[in-house]
Amino acid sequence: MKNKKISPKELIGYIIAGLFALFGLSLMITHTVGVYMPGLNIENAIAVAEANLVTKLNIGLDFLGWGIVFLSIGVIIALIVLLTVAKKVDLEVEKNQRRAQRLGQLRGK
């Protein structure tokens, strides 16, 4: 099959999914750096930011939890884009196969 160009809608979907995944991954890395940062004390800026986030939002998710949520959202968006594009390509291939079969039958008569 020929290489198809990526449509603008597909590209935008991949970019949005990548941004969500990248943001989630950066939150998870920030959490890991904050946990293993030397000098674990009250002045650890990342630990203070995580504590403030948990208290302000009244949700028990720290940077690691939010990172997993955003990474999951990015993966789900990417899967939706991939599945819709695959369905569209499958329909196009089937249409071309039916057309080729009809043309073959007409020529055979």
Image (cartoon, grey):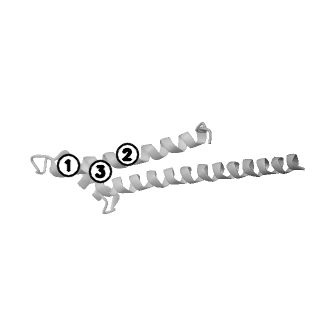
Q: How many marks?
A: 3
User: Which residue, given by chain and number where applicable, does mark 2 sit on?
Assistant: 23
Q: Could you tell me the amino acid type at mark 2? A: Phe
**Label 3 with label 1: CB-CB less than 8 Å:** no
The 10 Å Cα crowd at callout 3, few under 14, some 14 to 19, many 20 or more, is many
Left or right, residue 85 beside residue 44: right
The 10 Å Cα crowd at callout 1, few under 14, some 14 to 19, many 20 or more, is some
Q: Is residue 48 visible?
A: no
Q: Could you tell me the amino acid type at mark 1? A: Gly
Percent from the top left, x then y, of residue 25? 34, 48
Left or right, residue 26 beside residue 1: left
Q: Quadrant of residue 2?
A: top right
Q: Residue at x 9, y 47 (%)?
A: 39
**What numbered label is drawn on residue 34?**
1
From mark 2 to mark 1, how far is it between C-alphas?
A: 16 Å
Q: Of label 3 and label 2, which has the lower sequence position?
A: 2
Instruction: Give the camera-side residue of 4 and 100.
Output: 100
From mark 3 to mark 2, how far is it between C-alphas?
A: 9 Å
Q: Could you tell me the amino acid type at mark 3? A: Met
**Label 3 vs label 1, nearer the camera:** 3
Percent from the top left, x then y, of residue 67? 34, 53
Task: Please tell me whether residue 55 is drawn above or below residue 96 in the rendered image.
Answer: below
Q: Quadrant of residue 61?
A: bottom left
**What numbered label is drawn on residue 47?**
none
Q: Of label 3 and label 1, which has the lower sequence position?
A: 3
Q: In terms of secondary structure, where does tag 1 sit?
A: helix
Left or right, residue 65 beside residue 12: left
Q: In terms of secondary structure, where does tag 2 sit?
A: helix
User: Which residue, given by chain and number where applicable, does mark 3 sit on?
Assistant: 28
